[in-house]
Structures are given as structure tokens and as C-alpha cells.
Image: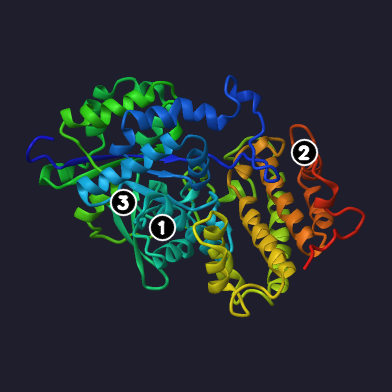
Amino acid sequence: MSRGTHRFVCLYGHFYQPPREDPFTGHIPHEPGATPYDNFNEKITAECYRPNAEVGNFDSISFDLGPTLAAWLEQEHPDVHGLIVEADRHSVERHGVGNALAQVYNHTILPLASRRDKATQIRWGLEDFAHRFGRRAEGMWLAETAVDLETLDLMAEQGVEYTVLAPWQAAAGMDPTEPYRVRLPSGRTIAVFFYNGPLSGGVSFDWDTTNNADTFAASYLPHHLNPQKVARGEDELIVIATDGELYGHHKPWRDQFLRHLVREGAHAYDFEVVSLGRYLRDHPPTREITLRAPSAWSCSHGVARWSAGCECTWGDSSWKPALRHAFDHLALRLNEVFTRETAETLHDPWAARDGYLALRNGWMTEEDYWDRFGKNEGRPLSQRMRQRTLRLLEAQYYGQWMYTSCGFFFEDLDRIEPRNDIAFARRAISLVWQATGADLETEFLRELAAARSGRTGITGADAYRQLPPVAPELLPDGGQSPAEPAA
């Protein structure tokens, strides 16, 4: 960057894949559409995650790596996972601040979640980040940038300093070349960056915009500077936010566009490439703003795309409220069983749920877990009570997975995404059945039957019954309770 210039650009990548694993086997079924790869995780890794990691693009951009994707990469392609984590470490070493952000754990649309579920999603996302990147996350990406003030307040309570939103999520006009401060109901504040809408949309959807990185830096970027700030010589930041999969998967060779832009193109035209965290450190907000809430980046109807249905997806979306009602009612029953059946083993069931991720992922020993969350000075009084409690905690885990946002994003119920969310709900039902003998399946199926595909006519109950078969004892069968584990 030439001396005296005040122009900064941040390329932001939201890198995420929903969980594709069969929740009973832990394996991803073969996905024919990913040919010649076995599944889409493998395909997108080959086309996007690996090439961007190997050429060092993660070193220069701001990004989040969704926990469900990160866990899969760590297991299946640890070299790629390691390069991405190392990129954040390089940023800390060079600039004193990392360039990675955390993400809410299950890509849940938080304005539609209960306060308790919002807190769990935020805490799990931050804990996964700290374990993976070895530091506290300063920033956090919200699924679909879906936001309300309660969500931001809970994030700030956990120490999150900033997030990223779409410009139309501001309640009034604003200048997207600077961060703003949002005052929250508790009196806390959080910083918000607004990405540049036209540029982010152009990079995402217009092939011509990303044909040449030098042309982009010379012509597209300067057009979006604030002329008043230019005249006054003030610093300003252009944020371009996109799905990370754009760079190589959705758009072949755009990983090379990104590489040239962040290494040479932007610099040649007097733009300094910077991370959000570094810019915020040097340019704290000087102005406050209010938000449209609830709102999101891919729905002009607040968050109706994931609840009541709206015109953001074509066709009949009446299946969406029916499916959400079935999930919400199931969640209430999961919670009732959980609190009732763990009263003898857990001091605080919800604190224990928040702490369960560390136990499940091996970041905490079972002895330490029971010492922290258990009654009776540690472990439950019997092996039967221990196993029942752990199964109910696992049911809570999958009760969070069933709200994965892509299950409601698209136009029809008869797609793999809603089916996967229904599969996660079935796993939660199975775990409750094994733990307590309580049948949550019958009523869930009755409510799922109200959700119907406008394209094929199948119902949510049909989709449930079409899931891969499991052993009969894993789900309610004629009202007979499975055998209790031995004490």
C-alpha cells in the first residue's frame, strides 16, 4: 500500500457444511450428485478447502470455519484442517490479533430459538473455537447473519466483541465503510461490521465481477469508497462477505482470483488487505446504530424463510411452519424428559448440557464432568443412572442438530436437507426411548404428517419412515420398553 492511503479491504469467507452423517452410524452415506467423489464434503474439499488452504488464502482473509465442517475436516483431512488453523496463528503472530471467527455451533437461526438454546449454541461455538484455534474468539458469525438483540446480548455476555451483518439489517441509513456500536438491553455493547451489499452480491452471483482480480481492485473497489471520507483523508474499510465455498466450488478457479487479489491486486491499487479483528482494534466504533430485528442476510421478510415460509423461495412453503411446529413440540418434550429424569444426577441440567460438548469430544474427562455437574459428590449412584443421564444428554445434543438451518432454507420438503434434520430428530427420539422408555415418536409422526411437499406430495412422516432402518430395539415398537441396562 502506498504511503498516505487510507483504503482497506476485508475479504470474508463463511466456510460451512451442514452435518451429513447418519446419526446412528456416524458415516456419510454415498451422495450420487457428488460424483466422482463419494460425498459433497469430499467434493468441496477437493475444489475449495484444500486449494485455498494450500495457496495460503486463509492467511489473508477473515473467515469462520463451521464446527460441523471443522470436525469432519479434522478427522478426514487433518492436513487441510491444520493449514486453516495455522493461518489464524500466523495472523496472531504478525498482527497480534487472529483472523478467524467462531460460528454458532449448529448453524441454527438464533432469533427463532429459545433463550436457553441460543446460549447453548453460542457457548458450544465458542468452546469449539477455543479448542480448535487455541485462543478465545473475539468475533462470531451468526448463521445467515440472523440476528435479534437477545442473541447479541448473549454473545456479548460471553465476551464476543463483534459480528458481521448485511447492510439492510440496519434500521436506518449507515456508512458500511466503518464499524458501528449496538447498545444492548443489558447495557452491554457489541461492534457490528456491515458488508458491502453490491460488491458481495457481485462476487457471489455475477461471473464477470471476478474474472480479473486487477480489474476488480482498479475499478470495482474504488467505486464503493465514501467520497466524503476520501476528501478528508479518513480511513475506510470495504467488507466483502460471501460463502467461502464460492472460491473454487461454486465458481471454479475463483480461489486463484482470491489469491491474486489479496496478495497483489489490492495492494497494487492502494488497498490494504486487513482482517476484521485488526481493523476493529485500530478503528473502534465511534457511532451507534439500531438494527432491524429479527433479520437475516438471505430473507427480506425477517426470518420467515425458516419459520412461516415466504417468497424468498418459490413454490408452496406451507410445509415450513408445520415442520417447525413438529420440531418445537418435540424439543419441549425432550426438555421435559431431560429435566425430570436427570433430577437425581445433575445439579443444573442446562449447565450440564452446555458442558456436555467438552465431554462428548474428549476435551474433558468423565470424572471431571461428574465432579463439575453431578450430584452426590460426583458420579451417579449406579451405572444405570449414569448411562441414562448420558443418553439424555446425547438426546439434547441431537435435539440441537435438528434445527440445522438448511433444513428450512430451500423450496421443498422433499430434499436431503429437511430429511437430515428429521433424521437428527429421530436419533434424539431413539436416545430418549433407550434411556427411559418414553415414546416421543408417535406424536412426532402425527405432527410431521402436517408438513407436505408441494412437489411430490410426501409428508414429513413419510420422510421419517423412509430413513434407513435401524435395529427394532432402538425405537418404540408396540409400546414395549427396551430392557434397562444392568445396574
Q: Are marks 1 and 3 in contact (CB under 8 Å)?
A: no
Q: Which of these two is toward me, 359 or 335? A: 359
Question: Which residue: 43% across, 32% down?
Answer: 49
As drawn, 287 above or below 239: below
Q: Residue at point 23% right, 58% down?
A: 284
Left or right of 208? Residue 144 is right
Q: Secondary structure at mark 2?
A: loop
Q: Nearer the viewer's eye, disc 2 or disc 3?
A: 2
Q: CA distance from mark 2 to mark 3?
A: 51 Å
Q: Residues within 10 Å of mark 2 (few under 14, many from 20)?
A: few
**374 relative to 389 in the view: left or right:** left
- The secondary structure type at the circle numbered 1 is loop
> SS at mark 3?
loop
Disc 2 marks which amino acid?
Answer: Pro
Q: CA distance from mark 1 to mark 3?
A: 11 Å
Q: From this viewpoint, is residue 250 visible?
A: no
How packed is label 3: few (under 14 Cα within 10 Å), some, or many (20 or more)?
Answer: some
Position of the C terminus by quadrant: bottom right
Q: Which disc number belongs to residue 182?
A: none
Residue at 22% across / 42% down in the picture?
Answer: 226
> Mark 2 sits on what residue?
468
Q: Amino acid at mark 3?
A: Met
On the image, numbered disc 1 is attached to which residue? 291
Is the C-beta separation of discs 2 and 1 under 8 Å? no
Query: Residue 130, how many percent across, how many down?
Result: 40, 55
Give the residue furthest to the bottom.
376
Residue tagged 3 = 174
Residue 213 position within the rendered picture, expressed as x and y whole percent measured from the top left: 28, 24
Q: Label 1 is placed on what type of residue? A: Leu
Which of disc 3 and disc 2 is earlier in sequence? 3
Which quadrant would the N terminus be assigned to in this image?
Answer: top left
